Image: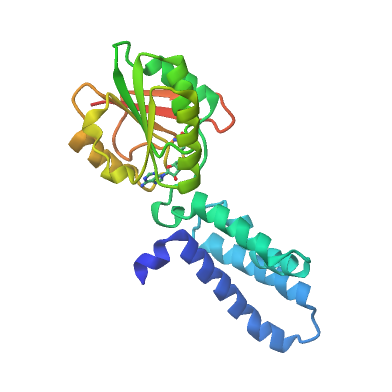
């Protein structure tokens, strides 16, 4: 039970439920109030509890509009099929986030350029993007640096399909696999790149130390490894203020 509550989406749902419970006595005490007022108050209560429960800041607006958005959507005359289609598409992109706590967001072109300058000069070096999303980074890097082999592994079905089609159409030195990055042996790569989230970084660092060869590079975009000083830090001036943390193994 404790583990389930630690998963942010479960915590968010429980807070929504708690906020509804908080409204119940008020509804009895002030029966003349209208439904929109109660829904708005429930949203405010959910956002306030989330703040106290130390949820990440971006959960607060989601918690605020969750129930109001459901109520408004149910009043619109939209076929349920569309909700089903949207749910399925979102599930095929973000469904695994529930477990991995790593959603899809893409590296900027500034990151790609900086990475290209860090890649080895030697022929046939190997690079892997752990959680390669839609494969944009891999394909661009391969056009910038033709002396390497670029690999990607992705768990989400739709981003994987997009990256697979991209690599097939571009006929590049890229190979994308559908699977779990934790099952990938990092010993085969000269450069390992990760753009994940703060959650997996300590465990990923253990894997890096266990498997990567001496002299290879581990690069993490935005998320540092707690307590492990990188050899080099590159701050970039892109839309998300990306920082590359670089470790020579
Ligand atoms: C922040 S995105 C980065 C996308 C791409 N690497 C880039 O830099 O543009 C992280 C990706 O990692 C994928 N991912 C998360 N956990 C994973 C796992 N255990 N195995 C494979 N892919 C994973 C997610 O589905 C998501 O597409």
From what the image shows, is residue 16 above or below residue 107?
A: below
Percent coordinates x, y for residue 162 in the rendering: 51, 38
Percent coordinates x, y for residue 42 in the rendering: 66, 71
Q: Nearer the viewer, residue 196 or 55?
A: 196
Percent coordinates x, y for residue 63 in the rendering: 60, 62
Q: Is residue 22 left or right of residue 117?
A: right
Q: From the image, which quarter does the C terminus lie in?
A: top left
Q: Nearer the viewer, residue 63 or 192?
A: 192
Q: From the image, which quarter does the N terminus lie in?
A: bottom left
Residue 4, image quadrant: bottom left
Percent coordinates x, y for residue 77 in the rendering: 78, 66
Q: Is residue 48 left or right of residue 247?
A: right
Q: Nearer the viewer, residue 65 or 152?
A: 152
From what the image shows, is residue 65 above or below residue 150?
A: below
Q: Nearer the viewer, residue 222 or 86?
A: 86
* Residue 162 in sight in this render: yes
Assign ligand 1 to one image quadrant. top left
Give the number of marks.
0
Residue 172, image quadrant: top left
From what the image shows, is residue 103 above or below residue 76?
A: above
Q: Residue at x 29, y 41 (%)?
A: 204
Q: Residue at x 38, y 17 (%)?
A: 118
Q: Residue at x 40, y 40 (%)?
A: 131
From what the image shows, is residue 136 above or below residue 53?
A: above
Colour setting: rainbow
Q: Residue at x 50, y 45 (%)?
A: 158
* Residue 65 in sight in this render: no
């Amino acid at each position: 039970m404790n583990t389930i509550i630690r998963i942010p989406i479960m915590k968010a749902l429980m807070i929504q439920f708690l906020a509804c419970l908080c409204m119940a006595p008020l509804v009895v005490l002030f029966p003349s109030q209208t439904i929109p007022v109660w829904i708005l108050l429930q949203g405010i209560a959910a956002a306030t509890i989330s703040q106290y429960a130390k949820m990440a800041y971006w959960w607060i607006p989601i918690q605020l509009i969750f129930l109001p958005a459901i109520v408004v959507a149910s009043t619109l005359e939209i076929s349920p099929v569309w909700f089903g289609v949207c749910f399925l598409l979102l599930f095929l992109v973000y469904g695994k986030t529930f477990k991995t706590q790593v959603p899809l967001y893409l590296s900027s072109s500034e990151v790609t350029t900086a990475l290209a300058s860090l890649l080895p000069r030697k022929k046939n070096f190997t690079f892997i993007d752990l959680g390669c999303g839609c494969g944009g980074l891999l394909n661009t890097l391969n056009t910038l640096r033709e002396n390497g082999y670029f690999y990607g592994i992705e768990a989400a079905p739709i981003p994987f399909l997009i990256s697979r089609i991209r690599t097939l159409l571009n006929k590049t030195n890229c190979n994308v696999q559908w699977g779990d990055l934790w099952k990938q042996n990092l010993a085969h790569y000269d450069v390992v790149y990760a753009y994940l989230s703060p959650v997996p970084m300590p465990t990923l660092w253990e894997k890096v130390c266990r498997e990567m060869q001496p002299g290879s590079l581990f690069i993490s975009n935005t998320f540092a490894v707690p307590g492990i000083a990188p050899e080099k830090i590159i701050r970039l001036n892109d839309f998300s203020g990306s920082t590359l943390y670089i470790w020579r193994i």
